Structure formats: C-alpha cells, structure tokens
Image (cartoon, rainbow, N blue to C red):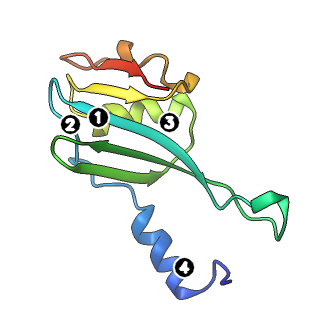
C-alpha cells in the first residue's frame, strides 16, 4: 500500500478532489439531480493503520450525464452554498435523509430548488 506522499497519490487527489470551475453547473429546471456524500479511506473491520477520513460530495444529473465530485465537509454550512453555486435553479434534488439537506427548499435561488428525500 502506498502512502499519501507518493506522486501518483498526490496526482489522484489533485485531480479527483479539485473543485469544479465556478461556472460549472449540473441539472436544468425540472430535471432530477441526485446528490450524496460518501466517506472514503475508512478502515475495514477497524484493522490496520489509521487513515484520514475524507468525505466527498457527488452529484449527477441522469438526464444529461453531467456530474461533479469534490472533497467537502458534510455540514449544511458548506453543502448548501456549494449547491447554490453548482446546481441549476429549478432542478429537482434527490438526497438521502442527512439533516444538512433540510433547508434546500429555502435556498435563495429563482426558480426555487425542489427537494425530495429518497431512502
């Protein structure tokens, strides 16, 4: 197993976790956008060396095939502003039941985002 100082690991993290450029947006009014967060670098069965936990936030618009992936905190203070910048107003957002997503309907975008919780 390689450590994080290896050049290939740095290249991987530099490309995958680099936030999308500012004008990049997914979705369109009336189209579904699936948003989710995932934990990577978790130890299996609590065995092995301690790894830094990294949360990634991913989104995809199935109708257009557009997607985004970035390293981000999973708090409402970071997720909601990220959605304002990277999800087109009027999109229908599908998320899990994470409490950080509770105020999507109240975000200051026009037309407003619709929020549906999927189990």
Q: Which residue: 65% across, 84% down?
A: 2
Mark closest to the chain's N terminus, 2 or 1: 2
Mark closest to the chain's N terminus, 4 or 3: 4
Position in image of residue 49 (x %, y %): 82, 70
Say which element carries label 4.
helix
Mark closest to the chain's N terminus, 1 or 3: 1
Q: CA distance from mark 2 to mark 4?
A: 31 Å
Q: Is residue 108 above or below residue 19?
A: above
How packed is label 3: few (under 14 Cα within 10 Å), some, or many (20 or more)?
A: few
Q: Which mark is residue 33?
A: 1
What residue does disc 4 label?
9
Position in image of residue 103 (x %, y %): 45, 16
What residue does disc 2 label?
27
Q: Which residue: 74% across, 65% down?
A: 51
Q: CA distance from mark 1 to mark 4?
A: 30 Å
Mark closest to the chain's N terminus, 3 or 2: 2
Position in image of residue 106 (x %, y %): 37, 12
Q: Which mark is residue 85?
A: none
Left or right for 112, reference 58: left
What residue does disc 3 label?
78
């Amino acid at each position: 197993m390689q450590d994080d100082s290896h050049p290939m690991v740095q290249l991987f993290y530099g490309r995958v976790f680099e936030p999308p450029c500012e004008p990049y947006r997914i979705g369109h009014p009336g189209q579904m956008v699936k948003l989710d967060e995932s934990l990577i670098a978790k130890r299996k069965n609590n065995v092995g060396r301690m790894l830094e936990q990294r949360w990634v936030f991913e989104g995809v618009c199935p109708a257009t095939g557009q997607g985004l992936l970035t390293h981000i905190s999973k708090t409402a203070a970071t997720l909601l502003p990220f959605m304002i910048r990277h999800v087109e107003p009027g999109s229908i957002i599908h998320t899990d039941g994470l409490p950080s997503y509770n105020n999507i309907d109240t975000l200051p975008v026009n037309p407003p985002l619709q929020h549906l919780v999927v189990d």
